[in-house]
Image (spheres, rainbow, N blue to C red):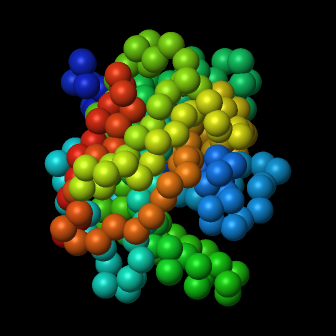
Amino acid sequence: MKFATLAESGTEYPIGKILCIGRNYVEHIRELGNETPDTPVIFMKPATSVIEDGGTIVIPPYSKECHHEAELAVLIGTTGKDIPAERALEHVAGYGVAIDLTLRDVQAELKKKGLPWEIAKGFDTACPLSPFVPADRVTDPQNLRILLTVNGKTRQDGSTSLMIHTVREIISYLSGIFTLEPGDIILTGTPAGVSAIVPGDELVAEIPGVARLQVAVK
C-alpha cells in the first residue's frame, strides 16, 4: 500500500484515487496542439504509480518518448460529495508537488485510434510525489510558482494563477462525479514547457515554500 504523508505531523493517508486534470493551462494546450476543453479533462492514475522523493523513474520498454509534467498536487482530507466550490478548500488536508509522467508517443497513437490511454499515464513510477504541507500553510493555492529542472536546467516555470479551472472548481467538479475520500489526490494540470526525459536525467520539481521533489531516470 502507498501512503501520502503530511510533512510536519507525519500523518499518513493511504492513497486512494489519483484524479488528474488535463489541459488546464492555455500555453500547455497550445504547445501540444490540443483544443481548449469546455469542462475539465479527467483521467486517473493507480496508487501503484507513485514513487517518493529520491525515487527512480523507469521508462517502460514500449515507449521511446516520456515527458515530464510538473503539477500542484492536492491531498483530500475529508469525505465529500457534490461539494460547493465555496466550501471546496475545507476538504483539503495538504498541498504538494507531483510529476505526471506521460508516454507521449504511446498516448498519441492511442488517441488516434480513439482508445483509452491509461498505459501512457498509469505505469509503475509514473507519479513521483512529494510529501504534503498542511493546507493552512498555503494561503492561496492560485498563487503558487511551479518549477521543474532537468539536470539543473529549467524546463518548466509557471504559476497556478494561470489555471483555466481553479483548485476550488476542480474539487467541486470532481466531487459531482466521484465521492472524494481521505487519501485521494488531485493533480491539477501542468504549465507549459513539457519535454522528453531519458535515462540518466535528474529531475527536480518544486513549489517554492511548499514542496520539493527530486527523482532520477533509470
Estimate the x, y position of residue 132 in percent, counting from the top left. Answer: 34, 30
Residue 27 visible in this rendered orientation of the protein: yes
Q: Residue at x 34, y 44 (%)?
A: 205
Pick whichever, 158 or 121, lies toward us: 158
Q: Is residue 124 left or right of residue 156?
A: left
Pick whichever, 48 or 29, lies toward us: 29
Residue 80 visible in this rendered orientation of the protein: no
Estimate the x, y position of residue 121 in percent, counting from the top left. Answer: 47, 66
Q: Residue at x 45, y 64 (%)?
A: 195
Q: Residue furthest right?
A: 38
Estimate the x, y position of residue 209 in percent, counting from the top left. Answer: 35, 22
Say above or below: 159 vs 42.
Answer: above
Q: Residue at x 50, y 55 (%)?
A: 193
- Quadrant location of residue 176? top right
Pick whichever, 199 or 172, lies toward us: 199
Q: Residue at x 54, y 34 (%)?
A: 159
Say above or below: 1 vs 160.
Answer: below
Q: Is residue 31 left or right of residue 122?
A: right
Report the quarter where the C terminus lies.
bottom left
